[in-house]
Amino acid sequence: MKRKIVIIGGGVGGLTAGIYAQKSGFDSIIIEKLPVVGGLCATWFRSGLEIDGCIHWIIGTREGDLNNMWNDVGAFKNDDVIYLDNFGVYKYKGETVSIYQDIDKLEQEFLRVAPEDEKEIKRFIKYVNTIYKMPLPVNYPLNIIPFDELLKVGIKELPFLHDFLKLRKMSSAQYATKFKSPILRYVIKNMPPAFGNAYSMIYTLGYVAHRNAGIPKGGSREFVNNLKNNYLKLGGEIKTNKSVTDVLINEKGVCYGVRLDDNTEIESNYVISTIDPIVLYSQILSKNFYDASIFKRWKRRAQYDSPSGVMVTFKVDSARISEALNHNYIYRYHLKKSISVGKSHVNDLILRNYSYDEKFIKNGKVTLTVLIDQKNYDFAYWQDLYKDQKAYKEDKMRIALEVKDNIINELKLDAEQLEIIDVFTPKTLNRYTGAYKGSYMPFELSHKNKMLIHNGNIKGLKNFYFGGQWAQMPGGLPPTLIVSRWNVQRICKRELKTFKNIKQLFAIKIRKGA
């Protein structure tokens, strides 16, 4: 009989783990508490329009190990990825810079606005060109990687090690001070991932500038549907509207299944959890299974922030907004007067115009979204305010109206051309998905903290694997995919099975006795 894996959580982590499990010869079942799968990779409808709450772009859309993995799980087809002329426009005190998806055009654009920074710009472009090529050990989990493969990766990484160590300990804001130009300082400081270190920022920009970061057509909805349909075609099973309340553990500490909220027990040989670890530890696992690698980071909030947000969505005329934004997808600009949001003061707005994809346009109308960054420590503000529904709704509308007024003044629009159709807060994310303090990603990978790459094991608990985006900083879709692959590989090692990579038509053999 086939060995069975129960997967807790039907987000991208659960779906991709399920696909790899089915491809490796296991039976698997996904347990999801919500009516639909997808987790934080969510879409919803307001006023006849689709709001995409997750995928704004994704790396690994053309070539390399990540692209091979996306193809393995059938997340998208390479031909169904949209590449725009630029990754966004940044405006600061009247000056604008376009982040072109072409390394040569990007260099010329930086030189255009800041010829006085030519030497530093050349050095920056060199970093983008070289660091982007740095190989990462993503094909195997580090705790079972064959020695010969580890040696190969290590040798390939040596030429990049000096730059990596130098930039890893420097924030994007610190790196920005190398430039004399105020607009370039603004751009470098706020380039995604703006919360991270200089290395992460440059590495991400490398994917963008070499056109290996695009937007799958149809956004999050089609992305999740592709994963779901592929999983079901492979013979996987999904139970929605079901919550796991307990993990079944025998006297030897071996996990052999789960218990659901209707007292149904599902026995299995292995369990993989892809859900938020706070939910896992507070509602499912007992306190006997304390994981120091995660909990010590939660205790150091100032050092290990988690990103959350308030998102305001408008219904706009597609042609009119595209004209106002000069057909740009992302438009970030500095405010003359800050906006109070939660416990924070916001000095910039990031507009996202979804007119780039015809699948988002309905009867000439489309969404314009504004995601305002919030830290996880702002969650207490929204949690308390939510107790007074009238005050909660009033504050959401105040923020939406202030954002609307700013956009009207910036883009020279009329008030009736922006219709507020949705406002979500960190409390919204927490209420619908259970995300810890409304965080849409786990611990930020900044210059001041230590990297977390979880080994998948929970001390004292056998045949149980911890996964999902919280298992690897800084989270997001690519790390979620990688961690899912790794956990199935770990199980294959335990079973002395062959982990199959269908895309490349070869088998990776996990060495016996490892």
Image (tube, rainbow, N blue to C red):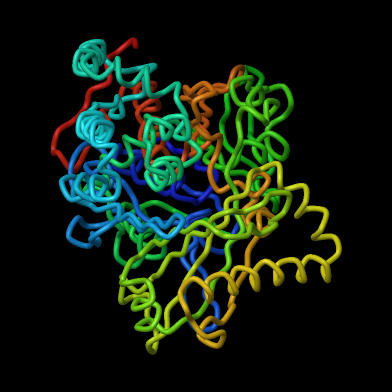
Question: Does residue 500 appear in this view?
Answer: no
Of the 4 image quadrants, the one containing the C terminus is top left
Query: Relative to 204, does residue 451 appear above or below in the rendering?
Result: above
Q: Looking at the picture, tell me which residue is in the foreground, 437 or 268.
A: 437
The residue drawn where x is 65% and y is 48% is: 260
Residue furthest to the front in view is: 116
Q: Looking at the picture, tell me which residue is in the foreground, 189 or 484.
A: 189
Q: Left or right of 250: which side holds 178? A: left
Residue furthest to the right in view is: 388
Q: How many marks?
A: 0
Query: Relative to 328, does residue 19 appear above or below in the rendering?
Result: above
Question: Does residue 57 appear in this view?
Answer: yes
The residue drawn where x is 67% and y is 37% is: 278
Q: Whole-percent x and y of residue 467?
A: 49, 35
Q: Whole-percent x and y of residue 447?
A: 49, 26
Res 402 quadrant in image: bottom right
Q: Whole-percent x and y of residue 408?
A: 53, 76
Query: Relative to 227, does residue 148 appear above or below in the rendering?
Result: above
Q: Looking at the picture, tell me which residue is in the foreground, 288 or 160.
A: 160
Q: Left or right of 143: which side holds 410? A: right
Res 180 quadrant in image: top left
